[in-house]
Amino acid sequence: MKRRIVLLGPPASGKGTQAELIQKRFGISATSTGAILRAEAKRGTPVGIEIAKIISKGGLAPDEMVLRLVAGWLDKSDGSFLFDGFPRTVTQAERFEVLLCKRQWAVELAILLEVPDPVIQARMLRRLTCSSCGKVISMGRHVRDVSDPCPNCGGKLEARADDNLGALTRRMEEYREKTVPVADFYHRRDILARVAASRTAETVFEDVSELIDA
Ligand code: AP5
Ligand code: MG
């Protein structure tokens, strides 16, 4: 079984959704650099205020900042990990390799979730997040609208600051320019698996599970 995994894919491709399913079935602790950065933004610290500006415009946080967060996370890790949305630049991928090498670890599997642009847009516009438990929700599937309580904990649902068409355009540009080369980076290492992710979350997860089990 693979225990050192990164999940790549464009915005709203289902990285967070698959990460939650993987964590539940395989017990690999998952972390999303996006979620960590949003939590910092919410705290309203000087760094958080900077992060909030970057995220709401759809840009990427500085590599140094993200790598510091990841290194801190690895310090507490038992050696298995699932990163959702990291690495996002070739610099992050290269420096991640160095961090892992120091611990005699290496990425064993990079999963790329592939979805066409119209699906991305539709999913993003329907996505809500619980302000209490952080669960990712889809309007129309899990709840009717934003006024409904979180089906997981009853908390208040909210839309993300970057879930609008303006920020999405920038997020897609960043993805194409900086993150697609990361997929090539793992392809060259022979550990990249592409998964067609516009099917149901459960069907996508069947393929993902097979890759992890292999
Ligand atoms: P991040 O939080 O990683 O956002 P993202 O990559 O844009 O991806 P999303 O979280 O929007 O989507 P997802 O793929 O997780 O899909 P989800 O499961 O929610 O990053 C946000 C920002 O933080 C970045 O723009 C950047 O500023 C910064 N950042 C983060 N990491 C960074 C890094 N490493 N370096 C620099 N900056 C960084 O699903 C979406 C919706 O679709 C949900 O409603 C869900 O219920 C639904 N859904 C999921 N799967 C399916 C399915 N199969 N069928 C139908 N609906 C589905
Ligand atoms: Mg996510």
Image (spheres, rainbow, N blue to C red):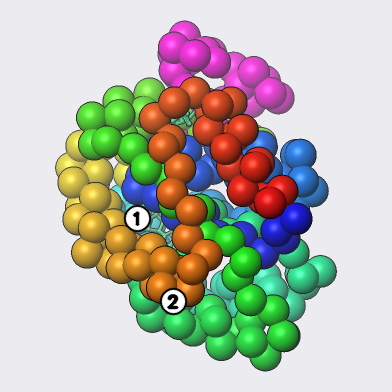
Where residue 77 sits, quadrant-wise, is: bottom right
Q: In screen coordinates, is 75 left or right of 129?
A: right
- Queried whether the magenta region covers residue 144, the answer comes back as yes
Q: Vertically, is 20 above or below 62?
A: above
Q: Position of residue 56 (x, y in %)?
A: 31, 51
How many numbered circles does the render carry? Answer: 2
Q: Which residues are magenta?
A: 136-161
Residue ID at (44%, 26%): 199
Considering only order in the chain, which callout, 2 or 1, is on the residue closer to the N terminus? 1
Where residue 36 sits, quadrant-wise, is: bottom right
Q: Amino acid at mark 1?
A: Ile
The residue that mark 2 highlights is 92
Q: Position of residue 212 (x, y in %)?
A: 67, 50
Query: What secondary structure characterizes most of the magenta part?
Result: loop
Between the C-alphas of marks 1 and 2, the distance is 18 Å
Looking at the rendered image, the disc whose residue lies closer to the viewer, 1 or 2, is 2
Say what secondary structure mark 1 lies in.
helix
Residue ID at (22%, 64%): 177
Any part of residue 44 in sight: no
Q: Position of residue 179 (x, y in %)?
A: 33, 63
Badge 1 residue CB within 8 Å of ligand 1: yes
Say what secondary structure mark 2 lies in.
helix
Where residue 51 sits, quadrant-wise, is: bottom left
* Disc 1: CA contacts within 10 A as few (<14), some (14-19) or many (>=20): many
Q: Position of residue 24 (x, y in %)?
A: 75, 39
The residue that mark 1 highlights is 55
Q: Vertically, is 70 above or below 153?
A: below
The quadrant of the image that shows the N terminus is bottom right
* Disc 2: CA contacts within 10 A as few (<14), some (14-19) or many (>=20): many
Q: In screen coordinates, is 167 left or right of 62?
A: left
